[in-house]
Image: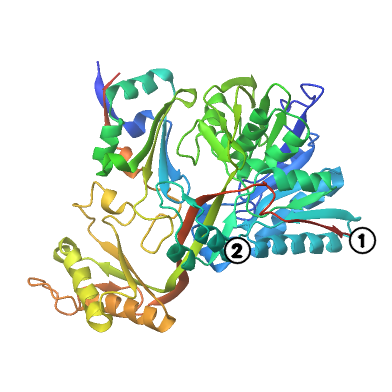
Amino acid sequence: MPASIQHGRSANHTLRIVCPNGHLGFAPIKTGSFRTGCHCEPDLICADSGSCDVGPVPLGADISSSPLQWQVDDLEEMLLASRRLGVPMIVGSAGDTGTNSRVDLFVGIIRELARKHGLAKFNVGYFYSEVSKEALRRRIVAGEEIAGLDARSPLDLATLDATERVVAMAGIHPYIKLLNEGADVIIGGRSSDCAIFAAPAVRCGFPEGLAYFYGKVLECASFCAEPYAGKESVLGEITMDDVKITALLPEQRCTVASVAGHAMYERANPFYEHFLGGHIDMSQCRYEQYDERTVRVTGPRYVPASELRVKLEGAGKVGERYVGIVGVRDPYTIANIDLVTGWARQQVVERFGDSGYELHFTVYGRNAILGDNEPLKATPAHELGTVVQGVAPTKGMAEEVCMIATRQMFYARLPQVKGTAGGVAFLLDEVMPASPAYRWTLNHTMRLDDPLELFPTFIAEVGV
Amino acid sequence: MMASRKLSEIAKTIRSKNAGVDKITFDVIFPDRATYDRVRESGILSRAAVCRIFGVDPALISDHVEFEPALAIKFTIYRRMPSGSPGDADVFGSQQYGPLLDIEVPGMP
């Protein structure tokens, strides 16, 4: 263990949390620094398991983007440590999306791990976060506004109809309820990342501003330390006056720069963090180097919301999807690639008309990644790779849309092309089935009377 | 002797990442206050400059902040479509920072 990790608690009333992973299951926990953390007298072991970064497919299709075995391995590492130390373990936004099926999956894994290891009886608490489309429909029909975030329009019935599944972002409330009811392990549905850590801190009486900040800084584990290293554990400690965060990997340190830099990670504005019940204002935060690998933060301010509004995430299916890959090396064809894709698109239009499907050409080597924002789009590389996506209501039609577009790039008629034996290069003379295409249909907020009303909680005894 | 240097040579971190499903946020973090101040004053990452670099309308910039505790300039751009929609080729928004690397910063020692 690094000698500089502070063993002694820095105040009489403190709460220590080890966070082993910023997105549990997405990539495996690095166990060395986690075990170091377990030697530092943690009061809880907590991790977030969800993210909307993985795109709309997992929520829409109700699947995980993380492999089952990695989820099992991470939960096993946390569960065994939690039971051995006799401290609670909390996982939020189970299985990437926090849908009901993902909560059930994780509860089932905990149950199975308890049996496998013959763990003494303990309580698993869990809660759901899904919101039924019917409940949303009733609100809209009754004239209530489901307000759009990030310049989206209020939710309308057409968008709701095009939605497959909706989850709401829980705050600290179901976690506190389950801790009060004696849960030793909590598997949460979709929740604000910071709530997972703030809940036990608020429950123990720490100031809300510090508690939510504590969650904010811990939720991505070692991303708040430097040099960059993913999936390593960090140790947090909250007191009545401050939050301290310590890197546990010997090669990493928490520095003022790394912790302040993390405060702005993945958010539009570094000064505010919103969640069910309010937000924290971080504009007056002070960051100090506390010891070689620890940063101390003071000054975050909690601002309660005048109205309870919960964030909703929803995904809807666009269609079945096939993908083709097309290469181009002829400089004349490269210079006229839009004519080539235009020809191919026209062949699809002649077969299917111009609506009822989607056709996308993503041109690597020119502007695939930035699209219209690419400043260098007028100077493409010496070879291009185009990914063709056909999206349509049925697999058969998606395959045909994609196949026509892919193959017709080969037959594109350019007036001065020298190569007359085929205008493109195929990696595979086929198109491949991909995951169905989904899109984010909801990024909205909805009024609540009670912060628990969408989040039913349950407790089950497991172990032997 | 003052010269111009590329942003990638003087910044500590240049990154982009989703900020929710409808926006991508950019962080440019500097190793020391002098560099941070120099870049701020140069205007090469001003709101107007960002619009020029990415060819976007000013209305598409949702936030533009100088974040002194991290010696960072941070701005956030609305996506043209939500992350992961068919046709989006950067689900995490993590490669959008490319055009920032070669920006010339004038007046560097």
- Between A395 and A39, the one lying in front of the other is A395
Q: Residue A97: percent from the left, percent from the top?
A: 59, 58
Camera sees residue A165:
yes
**Numbered label tally:** 2
Q: Residues within 10 Å of mark 2 (few under 14, many from 20)?
A: few
The residue nearer to you, when weighing A284 against A67, is A284
Check residue A464 in the rendering and tell me which mark sits there, or answer none. 1
Instruction: Locate residue A137 relative to residue A234 in the image: left or right.
Output: left
Q: What residue is rendered at 76% in x and 43% in y?
A: A176
SS for dot 2: loop
Query: Which of the two residues, A98 or A259, is positioned nearer the viewer here?
Result: A98
Is the residue A159 above or below the residue A449 in the image? below
If the image is split into quadrants, where does the C terminus of chain A sit? bottom right
A225 left or right of A100 in image:
left
Q: Position of residue A20 (x, y in %)?
A: 68, 44
Q: Is residue B107 above or below residue A249?
A: above
Secondary structure found at label 1: loop
Badge 1: chain ID:
A
> What's under tag 1, amino acid-wise?
Val
Residue A132 marker: 2
**Residue found 30% across the figure and 41% down from its top:** B59
The tag earlier along the polypeptide, 1 or 2, is 2
A195 to A91, vertically: above or below: above
Residue A30 visible? The answer is: no
Residue at image coords 67%, 31%: A208
Q: Position of residue A347 (x, y in %)?
A: 22, 79
Color encoding of the figure: rainbow
Report which quarter residue B25 is drawn in: top left
* Figure quadrant of the N terminus of chain A: top right
Farthest residue to the front: give it.
A142
